[in-house]
Amino acid sequence: MADLLVTGGAGFIGSNFVHHVVNNTDRSVTVLDKLTYAASRESLAELPEDRVELVVGDVADAPLVDKLFAEHDAVVHFAAESHNDNSLDDPGPFIQTNIVGTFTLLEAARRHDVRLHHVSTDEVYGDLDLDDPKRFTEDTPYNPSSPYSASKAGSDHLVRAWVRSFGVRATISNCSNNYGPWQHIEKFIPRQITNLIDGVLPKVYGDGLNVRDWIHADDHSSAVLTILEKGRSGETYLIGADGERNNLQVVTAILEHFGRTKDDIEFVTDRAGHDRRYAIESGKLRAELGWAPRYQDFEAGLADTITWYQEHEDWWRPHKQATEAFYATKGQ
Ligand code: NAD
Ligand code: DAU
């Protein structure tokens, strides 16, 4: 029997997680991924073929999911439509993959008594005011703002209901904003890095004061593996690395790397319903399961990420024009 099934393992965080598992355990991994626009086979290319297998398919394909669950001991569920701006443009795929897809996995987990870890987001909690001393905890009420975050909130509720009603063995994690290699250039940090490589000004929504709590994708991966191995079924764990920065601070750090000043910013149309601030209190995960982030210095991790995009232009270049054309239609 193969060991671990990872859905969405050809995406940004999922592929990072597969690398983390291969480098830090003896497990073998099957990746189930639909290979949407957000996926890349290249992110898995250097992994050993005898330990990592890619199955191209949809998490909402019940017969396929049933077969794969019968063959695996545990499942980590990353697959999702993940970009807020896309969910504002066309919410349909978010409902189908994030809600119907998670439902399909839960039904298979119930039939085959497979251990499931569901990867979710801090966005399910809505947002905080800039001057609010509070951070999100596992007890914060759900209050999602966008079609994306509402679909993730819906998937979390399904997991909880399947644990309570059917005894499915599952955990949930809600993580803050990730950065690192292999992130699609539609997202904030890689978009601005690749703009600057092209000599284009970074595009900042609204006043740029929105705060995100940044964590390196490898730290997200180590947290998910810790929860899979040591987490208590039915529990939720928040994942964060105390990385609060507003968007202007992040862009200024990227600009400095390119020898530009903080005046070299283009302010563009704000995102509808734009969440103001996310902030994670990850004390439960640290105290109960002994997890700690490795990338404590955001600016150093950001510098490594900039270098990675400079060295991997072949990977992102084919997507740049279409990504920017989409944003241009919205004045962003
Ligand atoms: P991503 O968009 O980079 O990757 C998503 C992957 O899922 C892609 O490989 C895609 O092909 C696959 N996928 C999409 N629909 C599918 C389907 N129907 N069936 C099978 N595969 C499908 O996303 P990401 O940023 O790596 O996020 C991964 C997970 O982590 C998501 O569940 C997201 O909600 C969560 N998350 C992301 C962040 C972040 O900052 N990016 C933070 C917290 C939580
Ligand atoms: O908090 C976790 C979430 O983080 C994940 O659940 C999502 O999957 C992930 O995409 C991310 O969501 P955000 O909406 O916070 O990330 P994004 O990279 O789209 O934007 C980060 C911030 O930067 C946000 O305040 C919007 C702003 N932004 C974004 C883009 C693309 C800009 O100012 N300019 C841009 O060009």
Image (cartoon, helix red, strand yellow):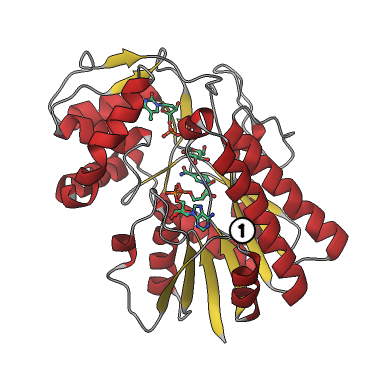
Residue linked to disc 1: 60
Q: Position of residue 67 (x, y in %)?
A: 62, 77
Residue 181 seen in the figure = yes
Quadrant, the N terminus: bottom right
Q: Is mark 1 within 8 Å of ligand 1?
A: yes
In the displayed structure, 26 sits above or below 134; it is below
Question: Is 167 left or right of 112, judged from the image as shown?
Answer: right
Q: Residues within 10 Å of mark 1 (few under 14, many from 20)?
A: some
- Residue visible at 76% across and 73% down in the picture: 111
Tag 1: amino acid: Ala
Residue 261 placement: quadrant:
top left
Q: Where is residue 17 in the image (x, y as percent from the top left)?
A: 44, 62
Q: Where is residue 244 in the image (x, y as percent from the top left)?
A: 46, 31
In the displayed structure, 189 sits above or below 23; it is above
In the displayed structure, 170 sits above or below 250; it is below
Residue 243 placement: quadrant:
top left
Residue at the extreme bottom: 1
